[in-house]
Image (cartoon, coloured by chain):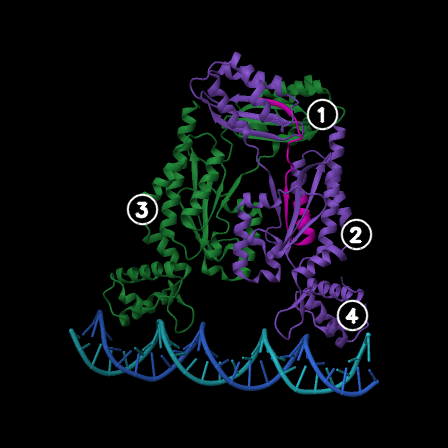
Chain colours: A purple, B green, C cyan, D blue
Amino acid sequence: MLTDRQLLILQVIIDDFIESAHPVGSRAISKKDEISYSAATIRNVMADLEEMGYIEKTHSSSGRIPSEKGYRYYVDHVIAPSVDKTNLNIIKGMLQGEFIDFEKLVQKSAEVLSDLTNYTSIILGPEIFETRVKQMQIIPLSENTAVAILITDSGHVEHHSFSIPNEISASDLEKMVNILNERLKGVSLAKLPELLNTEVVSLMKKYVQDFEKSYHYLKSAFSEQPVKLYIGGRTNLLTQPEFNDINKIRSFYRMMENEDEVVNLLKVPQQGIRVTIGRENELEAIQDFSLITASYQLRDEQMGTIALIGPTRMEYRKVITLLNALSNEMTDVLYLWYKNNGK
Amino acid sequence: MLTDRQLLILQVIIDDFIESAHPVGSRAISKKDEISYSAATIRNVMADLEEMGYIEKTHSSSGRIPSEKGYRYYVDHVIAPSVDKTNLNIIKGMLQGEFIDFEKLVQKSAEVLSDLTNYTSIILGPEIFETRVKQMQIIPLSENTAVAILITDSGHVEHHSFSIPNEISASDLEKMVNILNERLKGVSLAKLPELLNTEVVSLMKKYVQDFEKSYHYLKSAFSEQPVKLYIGGRTNLLTQPEFNDINKIRSFYRMMENEDEVVNLLKVPQQGIRVTIGRENELEAIQDFSLITASYQLRDEQMGTIALIGPTRMEYRKVITLLNALSNEMTDVLYLWYKNNGK
DNA sequence: GTTAGCACTCTCTTCCTCCGAGTGCTAATT
DNA sequence: AATTAGCACTCGGAGGAAGAGAGTGCTAAC
């Protein structure tokens, strides 16, 4: 456990380093307004903090920088989720406009988040499990191609072109769609695959010739449920001094190119804010970074994740506040929207 | 006009520099198999080439590197569009698979192109002017929201959520859609805005109450015709030695983040291959790069553009060959597809 | 318990030197 | 007349030495 004085000095070191990116020396600390000790005293405290592992030197006679353990302590004990009115208003303003298309809104959120912080923002979702099938359609384009469309009550549209084998007749296709619509309207997407496999199959077998094949094609058209990923401020991190190393840039952007990897990074069930600092991250490519994630919900069900990624020397206070605010707002908006649409 | 010997040496310098990225000296040239002159002779020729502006020194006693003028000459006079069988087969193989969704195919092309070259590929389009309206639909989601869907005969689906003002009744909406479908089916997208404004308007005024407002909302839903942009190998250029400069990286990626700018870059009517080298590019952010573009057509109408961007020290021969092959193949595929679908 | 003083450590920058690659020119060679 | 060998010269880059500056740990005084 840290004494008050140790905590104070740790905090000053971290705040200063977050701002300047330079090692912090005892003299600089002693000059701060909130510090009333001499440099020598500070040095003693710093020696203690270093021994405990909260700060480090870059070389034997350098000032100190926070260690990952130091950041961890700072995040866990120092930061009280506060409210930043200015940014909160920006977020509220953004989310308040006429709310039509949740996906657009998410995209916009990612942009605002990265602009506000100068880090890279990643937003996942919304997952569409909770949304329900509004309508399904299959529209023939030519003799042997068609496009299948699935519309959900959230306004989400999935579409998929596919080719129709010669054995399947247009009338069969039509029958299938009728059956699908009749049976699946209002079904939540989470239950869609199950229903497709059981009830609907037996029903269709009765009416549709050459059922197996049709079904196969149809299923492939609807089974893909991509998780949407929105990234904002891809190039923001380039201005960070820790990004001077070209190899770091390379490995980071390689990672970001790989959507699956990014999705996996964020696809974690969670409540509240999660902070992983440096080597706390399992993914090697971001072990020099910190990742801060929050989720937004619909009726206690996690719909998606919003995250910011930046150097370990991150403005944790600001970022956590912001993410907290945004996730709450998104949850609220989502709730209201579903309520207003009578579901 | 260059003599044969000057041309030969220019060619050797460029080929060598493209491969090594290091200035080429007279001794190295004289050692090449295809060169039978001594270093001293080469030096004389090089002095001439430099005087004419085709090559440059990096400092007073360095070897030579090609100037932009040198590359230009090389591209215009040395490169005969040849056929690279291996890569051509890769491309053909890729395009041959069951052709269902042109957009997916374009995306895949961008990936293959960047993998094959290690540069960054950009593909624009396909522009959908030539495609025709297959069906339009408006599906109400709730009391005051709906999603408008437009399906074209190419399998392209545009959708747009919008809110319905209270004054507009559901039955009016239905009428509108009926009218739209009746009138617009088979109309090419190029003519869509015009028709919407003339014929359809007058017709709808008759049947639909509060027409003005409905029309306004509907139009906004269908007027946006985004040009799709596919980028492959975003991080490929990071491995190029000329990308050691962080500022270059920054300005390049800034540019690439701005979709509009990239679209403008490629949205140029053209035939054949177009090569812009270094400062020939108007856009400042890529004045250290070369951009090579080709287009693909449908019945002499340009549908889209494919491009590669890389350092001015680019493998022009390979890239031009590849782009040439791909644009031809894409044009063929497009033609066949439309033919097979009886249009 | 706190602080002043001081020797010490380490990085960073600047300056210097040396080496090698490559050039341009001149004179010799073909 | 064209080509080539020879040679002095130039410049960038690597490597090392020296000095400045920032900061430390320790000791002794307050």
In three-dimensional space, the C-alpha distance between marks 2 and 3, rounded to whole angstroms, equals 65 Å
Marks 2, 3: nearer the viewer:
2
Residue under label 4? A32
Amino acid type of the residue tagged 2 in the rendering: Ser
Compute the Cα span from label 1 to label 3: 59 Å
Mark-to-mark CA distance, 2 and 4 = 23 Å
Element type where label 2 sits in the image: loop
Q: Estimate how packed mark 1 is, as few (under 14), some (14 to 19) or many (20 or more) residues with alpha carbons within 10 Å.
A: some
Residue A112 visible in image: yes
Q: Residues within 10 Å of mark 4 (few under 14, many from 20)?
A: few
Type of amino acid under label 1: Ser
Q: Residues within 10 Å of mark 2 (few under 14, many from 20)?
A: few
Report the disc number at residue A211: none
Nearest to viewer (mark 4 / mark 1): 4
- Protein chain holding label 2: A
The residue wearing badge 3 is: B82
Q: Quadrant of the N terminus of chain B?
A: bottom left
Of marks 1 and 3, the one in the foreground: 1
Dot 4 amino acid type? Lys
Looking at the rendered structure, the kind of residue marked 3 is Ser
Percent position of residue A2, x then y:
76, 63
| Residue A275 screen position, x and y as percent | 68, 51
Observer-nearest of A21 and B238: A21
Marks 1/2: CA–CA distance: 37 Å
The quarter of the picture where residue A224 lies is: top right
